[in-house]
Image: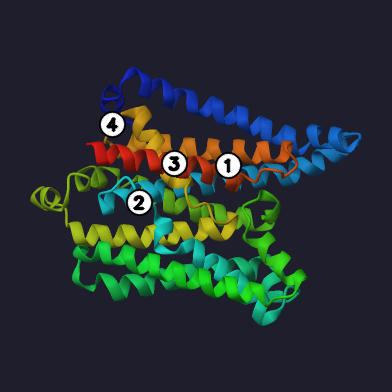
C-alpha cells in the first residue's frame, strides 16, 4: 500500500488494518488447538507428538486453503460490487452456489457415490470448477453482448437460473437413496474436513494468480467506482473492463467454491465490514481489509464449529450474520 493511500485512512481504519494480521494468527491458533488438543481432550485420547505432527500435516494446508479461498471470495465480491455499482449484491447471485450443488448431485445421480467421477478429488474438483466456469461464460456471452446496460438483466438471469437449478437438484436428491443423499450433503457442506490436502497445493497458485490479477487493477476500479460516464471521461474503457472483471470473478468464484463449498454471504459481509471500518473508497486498502476480515470469519467460524463438535456449522454462523447485516444495509439505504 502506498504512503498516500495510508494517509487517506482515518485512525480507526489504520488500527483495523494493523490489527488484522495478529487477529488472523490468533484465530489460526484457535483453529489448530480445536483440531488437536481440544479434540483429543474431548475424546479422551492422549495427544502424542506423532499424532500432533500427523494432524498438523493436514490442518496447515486446510488452514491455508481456507484463508486464500476466503480472501479470494472477498476480493471478487468487492470487484462485483464495483462493477454493479451496488453494496447489496454478491457474485453468488449469479448462481455459482446452485451450479456447484447441482454438479455434485448429478455426479452422484449419474455415476454413483462410489464412482471415480465423484470419489476422485481431482476429477470432482475439475468437473465442478469447469461446470461453473462454463455456465458463467455462456451466461455472459448470451446476456452481455450489447454492453454493460445488461448487468441488471444478468443478475435477474442468474437468480432465475439459481432457482431452476436448486429446484432440480432438490428433486433429484429426494429420489436418491439415503447413502447417496448423505454423500451429496457432505460434499456440498462448507467444512475443511471435505477438503483434500492434495488438491489445495495445486489450486493455491490459481487462486493467488486471480487475486493478484484483480489487486493489480485497483486503480482502474477506483475510477470505475465513480460510474460509467465519469470513468469513460477519464479514459477507462468501462464496458471492456467490466467484462474482463466479470470473467475473473467467474473464475475466482468457481475455483474457491469448488474447493471449500458454498459461502453465499461471506463476501457481502466482509466487504461491507471493511467499508465501515476503513471509511475509504480506494480499492487497495479495501481489498486488503475485506480479505483479512473474510479469512478471520471463516477460520474463527470453523474453529468454533470444531469446538462445538459440529453442533453449529460455519455456514449457519456466517449466513446468520450475513442475512442480518444485509437487512441492516437495506433499511439504511431506504432511509437515505
Element on which disc 3 rests: helix
Cβ atoms under marks 3 and 2 closer than 8 Å: no
The answer to whether residue 212 is seen in the rendering is no
Q: Residue at x 52, y 46 (%)?
A: 319
Q: Residue at x 19, y 64 (%)?
A: 149
Towards the viewer: 41 or 29: 41
Mark with earlier residue (2, 4): 2
Q: Which of pointers 2 and 4 indicates the residue nearer the eye?
A: 2
46, above or below 219, in the image: above
Element on which disc 4 rests: loop
| Res 203 → quadrant | bottom right
Mark pair 3, 2: CA separation? 11 Å
Mark pair 3, 1: CA separation? 12 Å
**Residue reaching furthest bottom?**
110
Element on which disc 1 rests: helix
Q: Which residue is mark 2?
A: 89
Q: Which residue is mark 1?
A: 317
Assign the C terminus to one quadrant of the image.
top left
**Residue reaching furthest left?**
233
Q: Residue at x 41, y 46 (%)?
A: 75
Residue 64 at x, y percent in the picture? 60, 44
Residue 116 at x, y percent in the picture? 71, 75
Mark with earlier residue (3, 4): 3
Mark on residue 280?
Answer: 4
The answer to whether residue 136 is seen in the rendering is yes
Q: Which residue is mark 3?
A: 269
Element on which disc 2 rests: loop
Cβ atoms under marks 3 and 1 closer than 8 Å: no
Mark with earlier residue (4, 1): 4
Mark pair 3, 4: CA separation? 17 Å
Amino acid at each position: 500500500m502506498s504512503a498516500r493511500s495510508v494517509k487517506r485512512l482515518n485512525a480507526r481504519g489504520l488500527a483495523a488494518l494493523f490489527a488484522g494480521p495478529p487477529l488472523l494468527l490468533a484465530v489460526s491458533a484457535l483453529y489448530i488447538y480445536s483440531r488437536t488438543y481440544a479434540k483429543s481432550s474431548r475424546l479422551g485420547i492422549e495427544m502424542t507428538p506423532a499424532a500432533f505432527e500427523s494432524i498438523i500435516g493436514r490442518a496447515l494446508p486446510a488452514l491455508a486453503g481456507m484463508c486464500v479461498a476466503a480472501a479470494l471470495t472477498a476480493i471478487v465480491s468487492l470487484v462485483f460490487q464495483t462493477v454493479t455499482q451496488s453494496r447489496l449484491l454478491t457474485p453468488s447471485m449469479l448462481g455459482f452456489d446452485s451450479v456447484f450443488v447441482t454438479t455434485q448431485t448429478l455426479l452422484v445421480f449419474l455415476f454413483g457415490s462410489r464412482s471415480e467421477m465423484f470419489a476422485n478429488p481431482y476429477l470432482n474438483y475439475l468437473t465442478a470448477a469447469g461446470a461453473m466456469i462454463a455456465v458463467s461464460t455462456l451466461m455472459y456471452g448470451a446476456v452481455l453482448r450489447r454492453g454493460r446496460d445488461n448487468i441488471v438483466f444478468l443478475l435477474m438471469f442468474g437468480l432465475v437460473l439459481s432457482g431452476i437449478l436448486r429446484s432440480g437438484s432438490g428433486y433429484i436428491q429426494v429420489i436418491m437413496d439415503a447413502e447417496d443423499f448423505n454423500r451429496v450433503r457432505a460434499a456440498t457442506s462448507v467444512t475443511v474436513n471435505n477438503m483434500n490436502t492434495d488438491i489445495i497445493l495445486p489450486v493455491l497458485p490459481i487462486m493467488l494468480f486471480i487475486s493478484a490479477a484483480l489487486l493489480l487493477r485497483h486503480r482502474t476500479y477506483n475510477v470505475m467506482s465513480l460510474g460509467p460516464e465519469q470513468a469513460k471521461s477519464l479514459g477507462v474503457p468501462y464496458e471492456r473492463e467490466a467484462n474482463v472483471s466479470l470473467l475473473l470473478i467467474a473464475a475466482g468464484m468457481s475455483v474457491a467454491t469448488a474447493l471449500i463449498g458454498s459461502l453465499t454471504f461471506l463476501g457481502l459481509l466482509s466487504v461491507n465490514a471493511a467499508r465501515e471500518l476503513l471509511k475509504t473508497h480506494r480499492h487497495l486498502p479495501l481489498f486488503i481489509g475485506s480479505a483479512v476480515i473474510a479469512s478471520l470469519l471463516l477460520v474463527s467460524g470453523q474453529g468454533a464449529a470444531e469446538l462445538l463438535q459440529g453442533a453449529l456449522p460455519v455456514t449457519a454462523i456466517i449466513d446468520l450474520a450475513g442475512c442480518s447485516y444485509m437487512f441492516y444495509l437495506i433499511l439504511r439505504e431506504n432511509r437515505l
